[in-house]
Amino acid sequence: MEIFWLILSIIIILIGILGTIVPLLPGIPLIYASYCIWGLASGWKDYGLTTMIVLGFITLISVLLDYYSGAIGAKKYGATSAGVLGSIIGAIVGAFILSIPGLILGPFLGAVLGEILVGKKHAEAWRAGWGAFLGFLGGTLFKISASIMMFFLFLYFIIF
């Protein structure tokens, strides 16, 4: 029966890795859930509380980055609070309406619209949008890197 849980955990991890680039699929939380499943099934023989706390922290950061990475980037590029809020709203609305293209374009367009609505010049608004886009890319890179690291760490724990 243990082999079933191991295979299930690995399948969930692979789906989680896919979820780091597919919107509305919680990538890193799925990977964390697979650690919980295998830990419970195996009696926590391969890893323990410290590992789960560290991976839980990484999972929390990845969830926050899903919504705030564009806002962080926009702020770094001079966005006002309207541009930052616009990038967050753009990320959420874009992901639900246009899936992957919306997730990419949403923070950018939200930051630009937020800046224009408060009277910023177009050049400043575009700069904030560019920052939101770069923030989104940085957050995505973090999530992809974290998911791959978590996968190989899981394999390491199981093999060694």
Image (cartoon, rainbow, N blue to C red):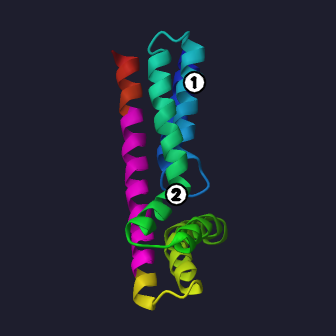
Mark 2 → mark 1, Cα distance in angstroms: 26 Å
Q: Amino acid at mark 2?
A: Tyr
In the image, the segment drawn in magenta is 127-151
Q: Position of residue 91 (x, y in %)?
A: 57, 66
Q: Position of residue 108 (x, y in %)?
A: 49, 74
Q: Position of residue 67 (x, y in %)?
A: 56, 57
Check the picture and name the quadrant holding the N terminus: top right
Q: Is residue 22 visible?
A: no
Badge nearest the viewer, 2 or 1: 2
Residue pictured at 45% horizontal, 18% vertical: 50
- Left or right of 76? Residue 41 is right
Residue pictured at 40% horizontal, 70% vertical: 131
Q: Would residue 133 be counted in the magenta stretch?
A: yes
The numbered mark at residue 36 is: 1
- Other residues around mark 2 within 10 Å, as few (<14) / some (14–19) / many (≥20): many
Read off the residue under disc 2. 68
